[in-house]
Amino acid sequence: MLNLSSLAGALPEINQSRMVSSGYAVWLVWDGKLNTAITHTMRDYGCLLMAEEERQALWYCPNSEVFRALARLQTWARVNSINVFAQVMPVTFLVGYDLTTSLSLPQEFLSQSAEAPNDFEVWIHPKLESEIKNIAGLSLRAIGKPDGLSNVEWKLLQADQGLDYESTLRWYFIIKPLGKRGDKESIVGWRDFSNEIQELMQRLSLKYISDVNEGFMFFPLDNVRLLRSFCTDMLNLIHEAKTQEDHKYWPVVMAVVPQGELPFTQELPKKVGVDWNRLTPDFPHMRYIDGFLLSPWFAVNDARLGTKQTSLESWCNIRLRKEGGEADYGTIEVGIPVPLTEAEGTECFYCGQKNHSAFECPSKQFGLQTGKAWAQLARMSLDDINEGVGQINDDIDSERFVETANEMFSAKEPSKGGVILQAVFDINSPVQPRTVKMVWRSKAKEWAEGFHQLGPEEGDHIWPGLKALEEGDQSEAEDEAKKAVVKYTRSYQPQSLLGFLHLEKEDPTQAMFHWQEAERLAFTPLQQGYLVFLQARLQEILGNFKESTSLYKRVNVLSPGWLEPLYRQGVCMVKLGFTGQAMDLFFDLINTDPNIFNRILIDPELERGRVQLLSFLWDKWSEAEKEAEKLRAKLKEYIEELDKRFEKTHPFYEIAEAELAKLKHTAEVDNYVAYRMLSRGMERFGEQMEKQVQLELKRINSNIDFLTERVREIQKEAAWFPFPKLLVEFNKDFNYCVEKVNWIKTQHLKQADNFRLATKYVQEIEQRVDTLSGRLVTLRIVRDSTLFVLMLGKSFIWFELVGLGLAFVGVPAFLWFTQDVQGSWLVSTMRENQWEVTKGFVIILSALALAFAAIKSAAGFEKRKQQLFDQLEEEMNRRSRKRY
């Protein structure tokens, strides 16, 4: 026995449903291999396969087509024997916010079990009996409840063999080219591409009607297979036309509508009730239920078209899948808030929303600061952005948009939804009063430095008039503006104020006139460019996209450093339907300012081309994401390298650690801007690290050269120490210094481990060289003292020998030469005390010899010392040369 609960357990779990619809579930149980005719028939009649296992499957059908499908299979089974059990029961169809589909089955059905019968049996729930009676040829027969089914009066379906039970699912496929019909470019472009479409329709044997005036081309598709075939071929044709030079391409919008009671006549496109100006180009639009029917081969995309997506009758669009089931290109899964896109009508001049007028726009109360929201948005991942979109959907009341939006703006701690909403309003900040104030105060000529030179609020009536406009007092604002015009006849400010006043009075003609007059009176490129920008924005919200694009181009000439006009040109192209052409412009802007990427993700004014935009952005996102993965790995290497290269006490370590912490935090955010910030930050840090390493290497090499010279000097000085056996500690430190100097000079210091060891060794060598230098002072004293004593002794001995010679020769000679002298006390005394006189004379001469020796040694000590050192060094060098 096979259990239905097993299939129900395989269904996706949807916690919060976006769409809920009642319909019919078909539980199929079979023996062996299921005949493919059953699967094809179920699909051809609009049934969706929800879950499948071996020998059982669960299908869903939104309408009574399921009974025709089963009746046809039953008729076919009478000729072709098949053992299939089919049970039809009422269920609820659920669609999640990510467009995941599931079923809600009553608890009584989940405990059911069944086996394949000997024939094709279709059991119908009694609640569906009225549906059966509405289809000719079908009836129910009660023959008892099979074992394993829920305890209700299940009945067997009986089909009349004389009827074929053909499906009633039929559609009209309508194609409309973009562009104005009178433009030569549009005429030529559509003519060439329409030839390609006509060839496709001829291959499928489709009969079509072509509207020459409006450019519509439409035709019937009478079954699911034909719908699938044409959508596949059409999307492939568009892809080839875009990518291959031998094909002609022109953007078109496409809609698939049920035939119903609509006649196949020239007036068909006007009766389907579709706003063609809001359809996304190059993707077929259809009801959700039709999109889900094609979901095995196509990916379903959201397309609000001004209404809440609350039913399967709402609009979606589709794109091709690959053989593996994935879309033939990626797309960024980011939602857009429903309250910002569901309204219809004219866009607000200040913010682009259609759910309020310019008079009541919340942006009029914003302060001067802009850009903060973009920095906050850059720190939000895609999941955070989607969560913020959900908060806006929950907290913003479409009927009370202004009040609920102001509540979200006034929160002390902005939520994720508040950040996104603020960013949405910041998109059009250049045309809001907060920017007007800065333009009026700006003293600069160019836009790039325009808001760095702001003057005071000068001029009577002008500023009170603008304040009254912000507060909603149009009468006061008009009075002040008229007074300002009279007082300042040559000033552009009163005229620009009158332009805003007429704008809020919904008089665009007068608003345009006053802004043109203000442009004539403006005297700097910044002022002129801004006033032309206001005119371009007014043309844009009026739907005159070509005129607005031309004006935005004029702004580029007047203010070449301003990116906003370029972005608005891209927006106008998307609104016209030329999304592919706009992406080239957007990509250039993204390369200049990555925040443009996030702007495109959340900009409600780009809704028409959203599917294409998200697909185009996927390439940049995927590229940045892959690069971010590499950078995250590189960041780990930098963190490890920092610890390997530098001690925590190193001055660079603290700076680098703080920078790496910021980069690590940035790397955790899945956001394109964060990816770009990570890339720039890693590049900058890499340069800083390389610069610091080079600086350290230069310092190490310089220190090593200096320390090498010091070690040589120490070696030279220590070599003359007369008592080498006493230099045990000195030699130990000296040998350590020599060993580490040689190690540093022979290693590849750019390697992190060697770099850190070299840094450490340099510090140790410096310490030990300082220690050796201190010890060398003592060694010099001992060495010089010893040498001085030796020189003193040598000189003393020579002086002493001379003195002794004089003493022992001079005294006898004196006595001999004075032997005839009589009466002299000196002579008499020396004769009487010859030996004592000689000894005294020797002592005196010895003292004099010592004194003369000390004077002589001191006077020639340095010279003699240097001579000795030079002689010994020369002798050592000579011996060294002989050795080698």
Image (cartoon, grey):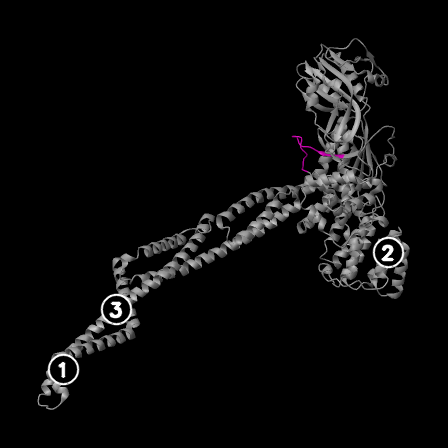
Q: Which mark is residue 810?
A: 1
Q: What type is the residue that disc 1 sits on?
A: Gly
Q: Where is residue 620 in the image (x, y as percent from the top left)?
A: 65, 44
* Residue 580 visible in the snapshot: no
Q: Is residue 144 above or below residue 638?
A: above
Q: Position of residue 725 (x, y in %)?
A: 27, 57
2 or 3: tag closer to the N-terminus: 2
Q: Which residue is tagged 2?
A: 468
Q: Quadrant of the C terminus?
A: bottom left
Q: Residue 789 carries which label?
A: 3
What is the spatial separation of the Cα atoms under label 1 and label 3, in whole angstroms? 30 Å
Q: What type is the residue that disc 2 sits on?
A: Ala
Range covered by the magenta-colored residues: 317-330
Q: What type is the residue that disc 3 sits on?
A: Val
1 or 2: tag closer to the N-terminus: 2
As helix, strand or loop, the secondary structure at mark 3 comes to helix
Q: Position of residue 371 (x, y in %)?
A: 72, 51
